[in-house]
Image: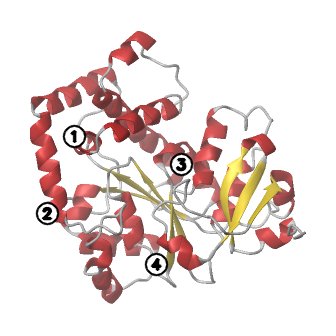
Amino acid sequence: MVQQPAARDVVGDVCWFPEDYVPSGNSISFVRTDVATLERQTFLDQRWNRDGRGRVSLKLDAIAAEMPESPPPPRLNFIWHTSFCCSTLIANALNVTGKNLSLKEPQMLVTVADARRVGVLADGKISPRLPEIALRLLARPPEQGVSVTIKPSNFANVLIGPAAHYSPGKSLFLYSKLPDFLISVAKSGLQLSKYARRLFFGIVSDDGKPLRWPAAELFQMSDLEVAAIAWHMQMAEFQRSWKEWGPDRAAALDCDAFLADPCAALEKLDAFFGYGFGPATIDAIVNGPVFSRHAKLPQAPFSAEQRRMETERTRKFLGADLQRIVDWSYKAYPEAQQGIALPGALTSAQ
């Protein structure tokens, strides 16, 4: 019988990656892995095949005992996003061995966000240190001098505010424009239409306000109308959380600006996060495989021209309905202000 490692050994060994928080046992499960494996994963959620890897589960109290609150928290950077805004592509581009490790959508942060949403942190059923502990575990660098940058799932955006207090790092707020967001949902078919509804119901209470739409009205909304409201709610979350990071630690990026000049945008991101890539590394990234493969399907070739053609095809298919939904959404979510971008733009699209 293999003896389970002690909490101290797991917490102190970065090869034990925290894969998820398990509410039923108030525990965190870890999987045995390495940096190269983490770098290869498109997503660190249920889509990551961990068959054959060692696993261990530790109670939250046992982990907390090995992570005293007094030492300063480790630096951790974030890419918060609305989805459909090149977030996976950017996280891949910023993943440079020996400089920065990009962790893409770790499942644990979604589960922790859900625990925060249902109030179990506030009512004392679970330690309020859960978000802090989760972030400290993810922040463990693979080696000294290497940054760790998390691209959380947008289902975890409710953690933007708490993350500002648990890390001295920086946050990028990445977004696409509303019409482009809707086009991406539409061109991806039924699966992402369901995704938009799950996103809506996942974040609908994040602002602490009661549901403003009667159930009958929600049932009558189309998938794209629900998606538009979900986009507004995410942007509102960004606006609310911005002040907790402050202008020195927060920046915004419209994905159109990134696509217009990836090299210039990466130079800005390098300077903002302090990675120290330099021009030669950035040139190699832009002209390397990251920009010639599909970000979510690395085995498939992809190009900016292909993306543009698919977008235009869907835009023509939606026709006038696209603008109708955009206009309708500002009436359905009246606090949203048209044309108001997030502050701190790194660069602008030409």
In the foreground, 6 or 71? 6
In the foreground, 329 or 268? 329
Which quarter of the figure is the N terminus placed in?
Answer: bottom right
The span from disc 4 to disc 1 (Cα, nearest Å) is 33 Å
Which tag, 2 or 3, sits closer to the chain's start? 3
Q: Amino acid at mark 4?
A: Tyr
Q: Where does the image place residue 112, in percent across and percent down from the top left?
A: 65, 46
Residue identified by numbered label 2: 305
The span from disc 3 to disc 4 (Cα, nearest Å) is 21 Å
Residue identified by numbered label 4: 275
Q: In the shown orientation, is residue 28 left or right of residue 194?
A: right
Mark yes or no: residue 91 visible. Answer: yes
Q: What residue is shown at x 52% (from left), y 23% (from top)?
A: 209
In the foreground, 53 or 219? 53
Mark yes or no: residue 340 visible. Answer: no
Q: What residue is shown at x 46% (from left), y 40% (from top)?
A: 237
Q: Amino acid at mark 3?
A: Ile
Which tag, 4 or 1, sits closer to the chain's start? 1
Disc 3 crowd rating (10 Å Cα; few below 14, some 14-19, many 20+) is many
Q: What residue is shown at x 15% (from left), y 28% (from top)?
A: 321
The reply to whether discs 3 and 4 touch (Cβ–Cβ < 8 Å) is: no
Residue identified by numbered label 3: 160
Q: Amino acid at mark 2?
A: Glu
Residue identified by numbered label 1: 179
Query: Nearer the viewer's eye, disc 2 or disc 3?
Result: 2
